Image: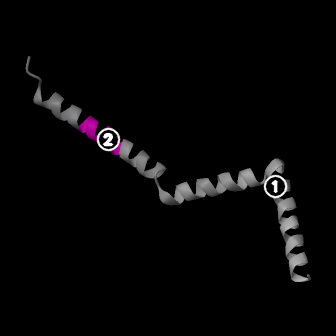
Amino acid sequence: MARDPDTIQREIEEARDALASTLDRLGTQANPKRLVDNARASAVSKLNQPKVKYPLIGLGALIFLFLLRKIFS
């Protein structure tokens, strides 16, 4: 059974609109600035957790003391 040309044209336009919408969403998700901002926010969130933050502070203090010892030895 042959399909009506108007039906075919409408289906093509619907498919085109769906594809355009999908491409817009992918473009938004793959935006490099957005990816960098998300990575930065994730890193800051992770570093602000007490179980990560305090050992890093301790390690920094330890390195600082070793450097002072090295300089004044």
- What residue occupies the far bottom of the structure in this picture? 72
Q: Which corner quadrant of the image does residue 40 belong to?
A: bottom right
* Residue beneath the point at 37% across and 43% down: 21
Left or right, 26 with reference to 3: right
Q: Nearer the viewer, residue 10 or 64?
A: 64
Name the residue: 17% across, 35% down. Answer: 9
Residue at 42% in and 47% down: 26
Q: Amino acid at mark 2?
A: Leu
Point out residue 57 in the picture as x, y percentages from the top left corner. 85, 61
Q: Position of residue 51 (x, y in %)?
A: 82, 48
Residue 23, placed above or below residue 13:
below
Q: Which residue does the numbered mark 1 point to in the structure image?
A: 53
Q: Residue furthest top?
A: 1
Residues drawn in magenta = 13-21
- Write down the quadrant of residue 20 in the picture: top left
User: Does the residue at mark 2 contact the one at mark 1 (Cβ under 8 Å)?
Assistant: no
Q: Which mark is residue 19?
A: 2
- For the C terminus, give its image quadrant: bottom right
Identify the image quadrant of residue 39.
Answer: bottom right
- Closer to the chain start, of discs 2 and 1, is 2
Viewed as shown, does residue 40 lie left or right of 64? left
Identify the image quadrant of the N terminus. top left
Mark 1: few/some/many CA within 10 Å (<14, 14-19, 20+): few
Q: How is this picture coloured?
A: one colour
Look at discs 2 and 1 and give the one toward the viewer: 1
